[in-house]
Image (cartoon, helix red, strand yellow):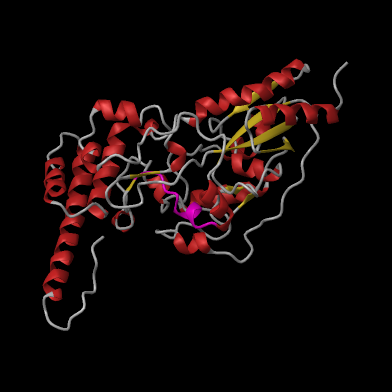
Amino acid sequence: MRVTPDGLYRRVAEASQAAGMIAWGCTDSAPLTVNTEWLQRRRKKRWQASFEPQEDQARVDPKQRYPWAQRILCFAHPYWTTPSRSSDAQHGFVARYARGPDYHDWLRRRLQTVLQALEEEGYRAEMAVDTTPLLERSLAARAGVGFIGKNGLLIVPGYGSFVLLGEVVTNAPVPLSKRLPQGCGRCERCLLACPTQALLGNGQVDSSRCLSYQTQNKALPPQEIQARWGNRIFGCDTCQMVCPYNRDVLKKGTAAVLPNDGKASDFLPWEALYPMSSTVYRMHFRSTAAGWRGKRTLERNALLAMGAAAPLSEQLYQRLQQACNDARPAIREAAHAALQRFEQRKEKHAAVNAQALLPGVQPSFHEK
């Protein structure tokens, strides 16, 4: 005899805790109808990322891919580890979720515990970890795991937005969870902090302006985006760093985080990022979430960061000149753009130094 729905709930809760999840919830497999208009608007406005699935119906209706599904169990796992050492111009910045082993693999292994529990009860179950068209954040919000903040990320009360999401689709009649209220209130810190004003204020993001997306986009970003590039090599955590829900997480860190963290991809000096050797790529990037776009995109990003934020050293200037003769067109294009920005910064720096020599004149520009 099969276990009761309440018994299923307890089994999933126990399996979730054993897998290291900090929050989970259950929603039904009904379509996310409120998201259809939003997806159409994103496409019309060209806000979507180039690698987003193009079939809207497959994104909003779980039964398009899982016609047998009755429930979708949504899980959150923390990934914040330790404070970054890459907040200065001496290093390139890599988003925190991409600093350890690729989470797609190990999160699936952890969710296997939940999958096994449901299968032992005689139900069908399949996992999805950012590998299907499903709108993970919307499903997790409907399942009561957290709420979608003004920065478009899922915020889990008590753990903030430094979480990874995974789903288990099943035909098991697990009791449904209640949706949480939106918790941002009047706070607009993320909107004000976003370097490119990519956040639209309603939980939606213009990906064409989002720096995190642009570091993954193979096309060279527009000049107005390059001007805000900073020292980013992959990803951008700015909207998360200023979020009040992440304040305590940033102070104390989180237990049970990314396994084997410490690949130090965010501690590498500029000289190691271009030209990037196959050894550096293999040791620090290939097996992380930053590795999927390949070495060339990371080198392109490093060149743009050198032009925008790296120290004004003669060594890096020569490195950018060298990159202008790279055999790869994408690298040459990025190098020319970065060299131009680097030279503009040098000119400003020289003008400030000259001005500072004049008596009674205060410099108006400070190179960092």
Name the residue nearer the viewer: 11 or 201. Answer: 11
- Residue at x-position 29% and y-position 39%: 268
Query: Looking at the picture, how far across and down is residue 181, in whole percent?
Result: 71, 54
Q: Is residue 122 left or right of residue 330?
A: right
Span colored in magenta:
233-243
Query: Looking at the picture, how far across and down is residue 347, in whole percent?
Result: 14, 64
Q: Specify the quadrant of the image occupied by residue 299.
A: top left
- Residue at x-position 19% and y-position 61%: 345
In the displayed orientation, state which residue is furthest to the bottom.
Answer: 360
Q: Specify the quadrant of the image occupied by residue 224.
A: bottom left
The tally of labels here is 0
- Point out the image quarter for the C terminus: bottom left
Answer whether residue 238 is magenta in the image: yes
Answer whether residue 144 is magenta in the image: no
Q: Is residue 288 left or right of residue 332?
A: right
Q: Specify the quadrant of the image occupied by residue 267.
A: top left
Q: Is residue 318 above or below residue 287?
A: below
- Residue at x-position 57% and y-position 34%: 256
Q: Is residue 161 above or below residue 368?
A: above
Name the residue nearer the viewer: 274 or 172. Answer: 274
- Point out the image quarter for the N terminus: top right
Query: Looking at the picture, how far across and down is residue 63, in whole percent?
Result: 68, 31
- Residue at x-position 42% and y-position 48%: 236
Q: Is residue 175 left or right of residue 242?
A: right
Query: Looking at the picture, how far across and down is residue 185, in whole percent?
Result: 64, 63
Q: Is residue 144 left or right of residue 207?
A: right
